[in-house]
Each structure stands twice: as C-alpha cells, then as structure tokens.
Image (spheres, rainbow, N blue to C red):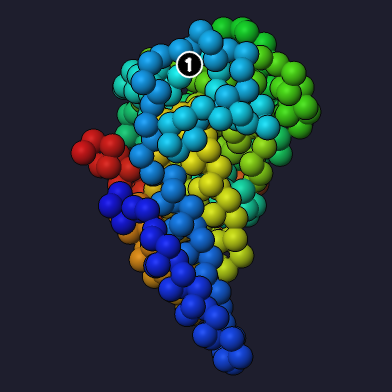
Amino acid sequence: MEHLGPISPTEHSGVKRRDSSLRGVRFSSTGRRAFELRQYLLSVQVASRSMWSTVRPPTACICSTWNDLPFSIDLAGSKTVDSDPLWAPRRACLACMTEQSQSASKGCRVVAVANQKGGVGKTTTAINLATSIARTGKRVLLIDMDPQGNLTSGIGLRGQRAAGGTIYEALLSDGDAHGFLAPTTVPTMFLIPTDRNLTGAEIELVPMPERERRLKRVVDALRPSFDFVFVDCPPSLGLLTLNALVAADAVLIPLHCEYFALEGLADLVGTMRRVRAAFNPVLDIEGVLLTMYDERTNLGQLVARDVREFFREKVFNTIIPRNVKLGEAPSHGIPGVLYDAKSRGAAAYHALAQELLARNAA
C-alpha cells in the first residue's frame, strides 16, 4: 500500500497550520461536518501508515528466552520492556510468528469482521456475506464472538449448542475444535454459537496462559475443513476482539456512512498495528465496507467519497444500502439474502461475495 507510507513531519505540521488558520471561520452545518470528517480521516491515515511501517525481525531467533519475559517488539525491531503484559509476545520471535502464520493461512482465509463502533452492520455483514459465499459451494464457518449473540440468533440457532458447547467452552477448554461446530440451514455453512456466558470470558481469560491465542488454537485446528472463516467481533477492543485479530488473516471493517462511525476507526487501526507488531505479523485489512448508505443525503455521499480518497483500493466497490428487508430478516432467524433474495440488500451482499472471492483469487 504505497499511499500508506510514512508521513513526514513537514506534511503533518502543514496540516496543523491549515487547521489553525481556519480558527474563527464560520462553517455551515454541512461544511463543519465535512471539515471534521477530514480531520478524523487524517488521524486514521496517520495510524494506518504507521501500521504498515517496515518491521525488522530480530537477527537471531531467541524464542526459548522470550517465554517468561515481558518483551515487546517495536517498529525498529528492538526489544523493549512493555508495561502491559497483554502485548508481550510468547513462544516465538517475530520471524517465527511470520513463518507460522503464513503456513497456517494456506487454503483457508480467516476474516475478522470488526469495528469498535456498534451499529455499523458487523453482524449483518458476517451473516449475509458468509451465506452468499457458502451458496457458491465454498465451505464457510461463522464464529460468534459477541456476547450479545446476535449472529447466533440471526441464523436461527438462538439457545442452541453444539455437542461440545459454545465458543465460551471452546475458548476456556482444550476440547476437540470440531465438537463446537453446529450445522445451519445452508449445507456448507457451520457456526460456533455463543451464549451469555461469554460475557464473563474476558475476566476468566486474564489468568490463562496464551490468553490472546485461545481462539487461534481453535481456528487453526479447523482451517483444513473450511475455505473461509468469518469471526463476528463485539463492539469493543477487549480480549475477545484481540483473540479474533490474533487468529485472523485480515480484518473486514464495516463503516456506517455517517460521521460518528469514523471516530473509532483510528483506534481500531492502531490496535491492529500493535497486534501486527506483537502477535500476528501477517494481519492485513481485507477491506473497508461502506454500509447503510443513503444516496439521498449529502453526508452519506461525503463520507463515501472521502473514505475512498483515503483508503483507495482497500475500500470495496460494493456499497451496502439501507434496506428494510435486511432489518426484518433477523427476527425470522433467516439470513437477509435468503429472506428476500430480490431485495437491494441481498443483491449488494451477493455482489460483495463475488468481489471478495475475486480479490482472493487474484
């Protein structure tokens, strides 16, 4: 991503000067929103640029000495003491983690659907994108990592458990990962469901060894059985989301075409940068998906235009419109693409599935 190269101090200071030069200028409501929107996008761009800065691995593998040391890897490649043990890499140096992640990702694409902002369409996207891909004959797994359980209920499995239990038991036990798979109404799509017990998992995971890799253990065991794995993340940046980012090959970011949805985007990209540096060197952005788009509003058009300007090829060409049928479908426990296959929302998710498949085939 050439456009995400390091930002120069001159360039950054120039932005600040332009910002300060506008003090006292009165904007219309639309002009003010446009100006503030660009400031948020600038902060996201700065964070994402640092995310793809070159990371130099240690000159020699010293994995055996890193197991119990609170070391982290900074972007210069040197060891530094990290006051937060959450980010202390364990059992592997950066070079080993890269090799392991690349070998594990062959044949299966693991995508975390994440955005710390709630109500942006994460669960709707996970359900309908996974269903659309499964209907092409691909083997797809959905993992519900949100304690609210909307994904589980959205495909009609609320209150149901697999033979081994839910994702809660999968994270806290060392049982066979295949025992947590529950079949769905789509023949080639399976689910690891959740329930309210997952609410306490973040506390129970804290004292566990390798707490940030609990989901990765489950996912790696299931990779040979699936073509795609989609992980629906909770609207936060806690241990559950961290587990999803460590296990994933890439992150799909649904972005509501409104102003407030941009506020947490810089924090998410910053978290991805830290995960990439400490735990998962191959973590990438699968794409930014514009959701709940209303072409009738100036703000929606402004957000779509500026997000494309900043993220360029990382933004999906497909845009998900506001659609009543997508909102009705979960109450019936049916994916929106099956509830009304002729709706605008269903057509958009079918197009998104084709676009994602084409990107991964290239």
Q: Quadrant of residue 146?
A: top right
Q: Is residue 160 left or right of residue 102?
A: right
Locate the C terminus by quadrant: top left
Q: Which residue is mark 1?
A: 92
Residue 144, given in percent of the width and then of the height, sits at 60, 32
Residue 201, given in percent of the width and then of the height, sits at 74, 26
Does any portion of residue 181 appear in the rendered image? no
Does any portion of residue 238 appear in the rendered image? yes
Residue appearing at x 41%, y 14% in the figure? 61
Q: How many marks?
A: 1
Residue appearing at x 51%, y 48% in the figure? 269
In front of the other: 157 or 310: 310
**What's the amino acid at mark 1?**
Ala
Q: Secondary structure at mark 1?
A: loop
In front of the other: 300 or 344: 300
Residue appearing at x 62%, y 22% in the figure? 70
Q: Is residue 128 left or right of residue 313?
A: right
- Looking at the image, residue 9 lies above or below residue 195: below
Q: Is residue 281 left or right of residue 238?
A: left
Residue 8, given in percent of the width and then of the height, sits at 38, 60
